[in-house]
Amino acid sequence: KESTPAVYTAPIIIDENCKLKYYAYHEGFPKTPWITSEFVKINNDKDIILNIKPSPQYSANGPTTLIDGIRGNEDFRLGGWLGYDSINLDAVVDLKQLKTIKKISIAFLQDINAWILMPKEVEFFLSEDGTKFKSIGIVKNNIPQDKWGALIKEFSLPLDMIQARYFRIVAKNNGVCPPGHKGNGAPAWIFCDEITFE
């Protein structure tokens, strides 16, 4: 038996992450279909600069797309990803204060039917002053370039409780689609999303 849903009137105040399921109803009219919306509270604990800008048609909500806590899904057309056409991602995240980090990750999408490939590798750097960066590790791709379907992979680098304020992430684009691909020799894309720290 379906319970009677709570009745709310505007405004509704949301102060934490939640999924809201709702419908509208007015006496004498049928109720609307159920709609579900997800709300994510964005913490103001980091900033980001893109040293290389994404393609204008796949720029989502700009640089903050990578640190807003909202993950892109398997359909790149919905706009949750930053897309780079034959060029690298190069981003610097400022944690606003010195923090101890045990893992850093960034997610990428592969959909070879849309000429979107995983990056060849992702290199991570750190800095205490935001100017001088040193490499702390490289994570190589292990997803075959001919694997069909929409695939999401996190490139994660475990760290030994490193202290830093600034982190730079460089993801190396393949440049062109590989032999055997229908776009062989044409520019390849990388699509990236959420950068996370633990």
Image: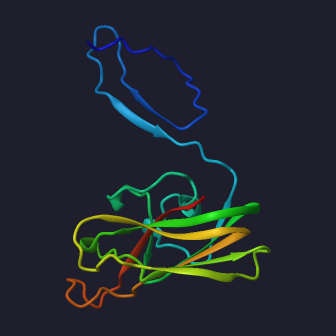
Labels in figure, total: 0
Q: Position of residue 180 (x, y in %)?
A: 19, 88
Q: Is residue 52 above or below residue 75?
A: below
Q: Residue at x 29, y 80 (%)?
A: 145
Q: Quadrant of residue 179?
A: bottom left
Q: Quadrant of residue 67?
A: bottom right
Q: Position of residue 33 (x, y in %)?
A: 28, 27
Q: Residue at x 53, y 66 (%)?
A: 105
Q: Position of residue 62 (x, y in %)?
A: 55, 62
Residue 9 shown left or right of residue 187 in the figure: right
Q: Where the N terminus falls, by quadrant?
A: top left
Q: Where the C terminus falls, by quadrant?
A: bottom right
Q: Residue at x 61, y 33 (%)?
A: 15
Residue 145 shown left or right of residue 159 in the figure: left
Q: Quadrant of residue 7?
A: top left
Q: Position of residue 143 (x, y in %)?
A: 32, 76
